[in-house]
Image: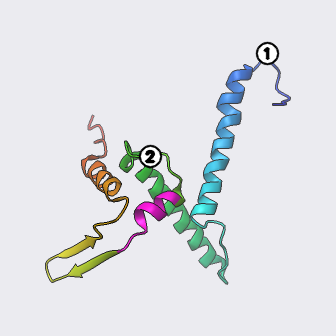
Amino acid sequence: MVTSLSADEFDARALYEDVYCARGEMENRIKEQQLCLFADRTSCATMRANQLRLWLSGVAYTLLVALRQFGLQGTEMSRARCDTIRLKLLKLGALVRTTVRRVWVSFSESWPYRRVFAQVYENLRRWSLPLPDSG
């Protein structure tokens, strides 16, 4: 790595690990949102519609990061990219039946990621936000 910062002011290892690698990781997250959640598509006719499209992509990315952090913890997909989570865990077929009082969602018995989905459900069911301090 080439830099104009002096060696007296900055430790080379800390500069590389804390600044350079962090920047690369942030660029990877931006690329993940653009490629996996279509943040680069601005094909609408108006700027407002494109802005809404980008905003929804940002919300979807935030939700998937939270799902990865809290729901997928301890599963084989805990470090999966957003497109893998979307295609293998969220994009699935189900039969939805509704009555006045209930909604039933029936998944296929042969779904390959059923065990992971059940683990995510349990992780999210047990997860709770920390309560704010009352003092």
Residue ranking furthest to the left: 101
Magenta span: predominant SS is: helix
Query: In the visual, does 86 lie left or right of 53?
Result: left
Residue placed at 16% from the left, 76% from the top? 102
Q: Earlier in the sequence, mark 2 or mark 1?
A: 1
Query: In the visual, does 52 lie left or right of 129?
Result: right
Q: CA distance from mark 2 to mark 1?
A: 40 Å
Indicate which disc residue 56 carries.
none
Q: Does the magenta-highlighted stretch encompass residue 90?
A: yes
What residue would you read off at disc 1?
Answer: 8
Indicate which disc residue 78 carries.
2
Query: In the visual, does 90 lie left or right of 119?
Result: right
Residue placed at 71% from the left, 29% from the top? 16
Which one is nearer the viewer's eye here, 97 or 64?
Answer: 97
Residue 29 to residue 6: above or below:
below
Which one is nearer the viewer's eye here, 87 or 59?
Answer: 87
Q: Quadrant of residue 52?
A: bottom right
Residue ranking furthest to the front: 110
Residue 102 to residue 39: above or below:
below
Q: Which portion, as a residue range, is magenta? A: 84-93
Residue placed at 80% from the left, 18% from the top? 7
Instruction: Identify residue type, mark 2.
Output: Ser
Q: In which quadrant of the rendered image does the C terminus lie?
A: top left
Instruction: Identify residue type, mark 1.
Output: Asp
Q: In which quadrant of the rendered image does the N terminus lie?
A: top right
Q: Quadrant of residue 112?
A: bottom left
Q: Does the magenta-highlighted stretch encompass residue 2?
A: no
Percent position of residue 67, x then y: 41, 53
Residue placed at 60% from the left, 78% from the top? 49
